Amino acid sequence: MTSKERVAAVFAGEIPDRVPRWCGASPEFWEKAKKETNLKDEDLRVRMGDDFRRVSSEYKGTAVELVPGATWCSPFGIQREGIGYGQPMTHPMKDVATIAEVEAWQWPDSDMVDISTLRTQANVWNGQYSVLGGEWSPFWHDVIDLVGHENLYYLMFDHPEMTKLIFEKVTDYYFETTRMAFDEAADLIDIFFIGNDFGGQTGPLMGIEMFNEFMIPSLKRFINLGHDYNLPVMLHCCGGYRELIPSLIDAGIDGLHALQPDARGMDPGSLKQDFGDKIVLNGSIDSHNILINGQSPEWVRDQTKAVLDVMKPGGKYIGGASHDTILEETPVENVLAMMDAIEEFGEY
């Protein structure tokens, strides 16, 4: 089977030749891995055995002058500081109090996104890999950045209709930019991959009722959009969110990634038992306790096998780390040991 065929079989509920492999990595880890292996980008991805590739549009909105200390500005005007995308420096909508103010806000235009290179990006792989596409669509995080995290919970209770409109406006942007991308290249894309972190280490960041009222409407729009283009939709979600999984399944999500086994309720065995026949499970190999703190590559190999023994039976499983961006402090030899072990023990 090609990688594309292998992953398609998993999402179709069929048994592939072996468990597909997923290797999401931070830019810092990837640069370190290239130096240690003396391999270039695509050669390293082949060495890892990664069955997936990604295509991305490019934001080409009006240039924003960064304030002192800022390293990046989001399409929603959020200036951020720190490592990677950093943390918001301000919450520009924290004092918005009416629906009229939300309507009048200067929301980003989907025309600011350039989708013209998507086909060129995807054609490089000649249909061999499972291609991830569409906008990341972190609507939950963008609303947090706009109004402030704690303040958002108050707004949900005190001004629910206004808060729903803010979510709708943010979702509109990602919906339209993704629709443009799919109109351009859906025939070359295999999975609509989105990301929002609804869980913390000790459980969901909100109750089920609040989740269903405020999060599910946006998620359903993305799910329906992907399905309209015959694409399965996979959600990246960090933390413990076991209580929310039934709602995600009911909404139509096809796959869940990255499944942190050290978060409450995310034990691989129980996830497989309760949800393994209903949805594709992707991850569960502990990025922290196995990959970063792994005693040796041999030990990582054994721990990876133990996860596969639980998750592999019956299919609907993709093997990989419990975080989408393997961090720079992770030993390269441990990641190679994990990827090799998925190949070694993943055959059906």
Image: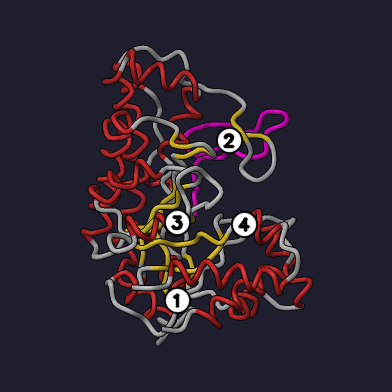
Bin the neighbour count of mark 3 within 10 Å (Cα to Cα): few under 14, some 14-19, many 20 and up. Answer: many
Identity of the amino acid at label 1? Answer: Val
Bin the neighbour count of mark 2 within 10 Å (Cα to Cα): few under 14, some 14-19, many 20 and up. Answer: few
| Front of the two marks 2 and 1 | 1
- Between 249 and 187, the one nearer to me in the picture: 249
Say whether disc 1 or disc 4 marks the residue closer to the N-terminus: 1
Asked whether, in this view, residue 214 is left or right of residue 332, the answer is: left
Give me the C-alpha separation between circle 2 and circle 3. Answer: 33 Å
To which residue does mark 4 refer? 287
Identity of the amino acid at label 4? Answer: Ser
Which mark is on residue 64?
2
Residue at horizontal 56 percent and vertical 78 percent from the top = 49
Give me the C-alpha separation between circle 3 and circle 1. Answer: 15 Å
- The residue segment tinted magenta is 57-79
The answer to which image quadrant residue 193 occupies is bottom left
Give me the C-alpha separation between circle 1 and circle 4. Answer: 19 Å
| Front of the two marks 4 and 3 | 4
- Between 60 and 165, the one nearer to me in the picture: 165
Q: Do the residues labelled 4 and 3 touch (CB within 8 Å)?
A: no
Say whether disc 2 or disc 1 marks the residue closer to the N-terminus: 1
Q: Do the residues labelled 1 and 4 touch (CB within 8 Å)?
A: no
Give me the C-alpha separation between circle 2 and circle 4. Answer: 35 Å
To which residue does mark 1 refer? 19
- Between 329 and 123, the one nearer to me in the picture: 329
Magenta region, main secondary structure: loop
| Front of the two marks 2 and 4 | 4
Where is residue 324? Give x, y as percent: 54, 56
Give me the C-alpha separation between circle 4 and circle 3. Answer: 13 Å
